[in-house]
Amino acid sequence: MVGIVVVSHSPDLARAAVTLALQMVHGSAPRIEVAAGTSDDRLGTDAAAVAEAVVAADDGEGVVVIMDLGSAVLSAELALELLPDPGIRTRLVSAAFVEGIFAAAVSAAAGAQLDVVARDAAEALDAKAAQLGQTQPPTGAHDSITPPAAVVAKATIVNADGIHARPAARIVATLASLDARVTIATERSAPVSARSPTALMSLGTRIGDVLRIEADGVDAAAAADRIAALVSDGFSELAGRDRLGPEASDRDQLSPSIGVSPGRVVGPALRMPDPIAAPDPTIRIPEAERPAAIEQLTSVAADIAEQLRSRSPAAGTVGQLLEATAAIATDPDLISDASRRIRDRGLTPERAAWEAIDSVADTLRAAGPRQAERVSDLYDIRNRMVSSLTGRAIPGVVDPGHPFVLLAVDLAPADTAGLERTRCLAIVTEEGGATSHTAIIARSLGIPAVVGVRGATAIPDGTVLLVDGKTGEVIKEPTVDQRATAATVSQPREMLISPGGTADGHRIALLANIGSAHEIAAALECGAEGVGLYRTELSFLGWTEAPSVGEQVSTYRTVFSRFGGRRVVVRTLDAGSDKPMPFLGQAAEPNPALGVRGFRTAASHPEVLHDQLDAVKEAAAAESADVWVMAPMISTVDEVRIFARAAHDAGLPVIGAMIETPAAALRAELILAEVDFVSIGTNDLAQYTFAADRHAASLAPLNDPWQPALLRMIEMVTTAADPRGKPVGVCGEAAADPLLAPVLAGLGISSLSMASGALAEVGRSLAAVTLEVCRRAARAACDSESPAAAREAVRAIIST
Ligand code: PEP
Ligand code: MG
């Protein structure tokens, strides 16, 4: 692309103008270098700095230089004499500063050649001048002596905002590859050059305006046709079913965004309601009002049961579950307990319902894991009752009865209990990065997801959204053509067809990450060789009492029994931070990600660790899975020793540690001396290496698993493991990236554990390369300067 250098007396002025111009550029932006101010921070210009900027901006296509005034022009001229490489093609342009930068940026981004970019910049002021009636019509305008155009086309504006910035940029981009001189006029205004975005915007077009498109030159016909087609298509800003709708200007690609779980789907939006807070326990209602409150509670409970039954299909598992939940709502014991709380203590009906249901939940949990599974149904009823009694929207994902695209600020594991991939077509969140819970949950469920989409929760329910979890695109009210590119129902999962390994037979075990029952099914369906990360804490989130050994044995057996003869790596409770476990009685922490989490909780609650290890041992003894155990969030050798001793005492044969902190990576050799294997949790390892919250969308680039610093950390661990020959796995989200898989294999990783949906593609990617290629890819990635450079280097190696 042609580069641009902006020369100004003021760095602030230059940066502001560049920022404004870049707003109009979509897709890749040209290199724009600023040479502004003097070396001692005063207003002025510096020829040497301009020369440096020209060199930096050139990628072989030449550089357009735009200056503000006076000495800026002299400095730019002198700079060209100072250039170390006289071969760099440059054009100093006498363009209006703001308009010129804007036009040059759009034109360069569209792929125009050096002289075209320079001309577009130079002509950028013509339209404004013509509009103010202060000059002759701009270049390209027709007057009486201009010969008639070769091609004339007409098109009617159908989008609400006409040719605003984005459509103008699209017209310019469309013309970039065509050899034609094109003007556009309306009935109210003189023709302007169709290659000038500012001129196009100055036409002030509105819906219903008829444009006259005139074109000359070799590609005149194609140019006129393509512009007419763009205009008639509303510049892709229209919904297929509502082409002239009033909200057309809202229809847009939402950005910035990060695709974190692949799949391209289209469906109506559904916003996740706010969570329900516990009703105030201190309010008392007068005695005289209590009978009416009891009546209100009873009738709300009956209404909720009725709503659930009316959504219930006549038969099948879902129908039975909804019927069971409806029955809970009108359970006479529950209603009489809540009524007593109103009658005797004067609680509000919502508080009475809250307390009564909490008490049943406690009883169910104590009754064993099978009964505990119903607790989420109870909470569903509780939330419905409280919201109905207080006139609020029901929290959590309430199935609207049709497939939907879920919109939320961010998702915690508990929010998505019961989220069905057949119902939830896609997830779009405002917060989160590639390793945030939303991303992990979405991948594990096989639901396409995009995170970091600002304003997502402001989109009204029912708005049709197209979501592409690979590219990160989220398009409101897509056109008919766009919709045709996406699925309207969830896609079947792909299966891993052969055990993991490179083309020359180097084995890499391909395992699944699981945390709940539905993930077991997905792992089996996708052909996982085993489980590389069993997140046990997800079974006990929110529990107020520690699960007993018996409860845990039953939970773990459910998993082990499904993976008979296969490896299952059990991670002990990774409590704390965003995975609350009230039974650990943790105090609120100012910075929980850096607080008492993971293995650190064992210091204050050793009995919880010992019970869990005993339960894992007992469950393993009863089933035939090859059970390994590991501890999360290890940061010192002492911690590993304590864990290894406890696991050994519990009789567990294969003991490991997670490498999730830079401290653990640095001490990998000593840690490996204590255990049989390690597994690298790249999600946390990245967050702690870069001191960048993995849930913060704005920091997602730092948590990119392709960051060479993270890859070097992994290399440090595999190098330490090599002499001992102990296995090193990766179980963070990095393992699910098919392009990264050869890099990890080349670094010496022996297993990759990931969301099941990624298994097939990762398997294919490994099977296409030899170990030698993997090693070269690993070296190149580790030695790259940036994630982008690492990706590019690896792609080049793999494709040769
Ligand atoms: C990790 O940190 O990479 C990991 C696998 O653990 P979690 O994502 O559960 O924190
Ligand atoms: Mg972790």
Image (spheres, helix red, strand yellow):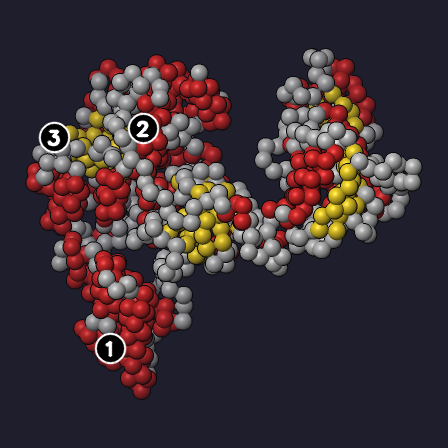
Whether label 1 touches label 2, CB < 8 Å: no
Query: In x, y percent, where is residue 27?
Result: 58, 35
Identified by mark 3, the residue type is Pro
Q: In the image, is 117 to the left or to the right of 509?
A: right
Q: Which numbered disc, 1 or 2, marks the residue that appears first in the sequence?
A: 1
Q: Residue at image x 72%, y 31%?
A: 219
Q: Mark 3 and mark 2: span between their CA atoms?
A: 29 Å
Identified by mark 1, the residue type is Ser
Q: Residue at image x 32%, y 16%?
A: 771
- Give residue 742's mark: none
| Label 2 element class | helix
Q: Mark 1 and mark 2: span between their CA atoms?
A: 58 Å
Q: In the image, is 699 to the left or to the right of 349?
A: right
Q: Is residue 221 visible?
A: yes
Query: In x, y percent, where is residue 194?
Result: 75, 39
Whether 382 is drawn above or below 425: the answer is below
- In the picture of the structure, the residue carrying the numbered disc 3 is 653
- Give residue 763's mark: 2
Q: Which numbered disc, 3 or 2, marks the residue that appears first in the sequence?
A: 3
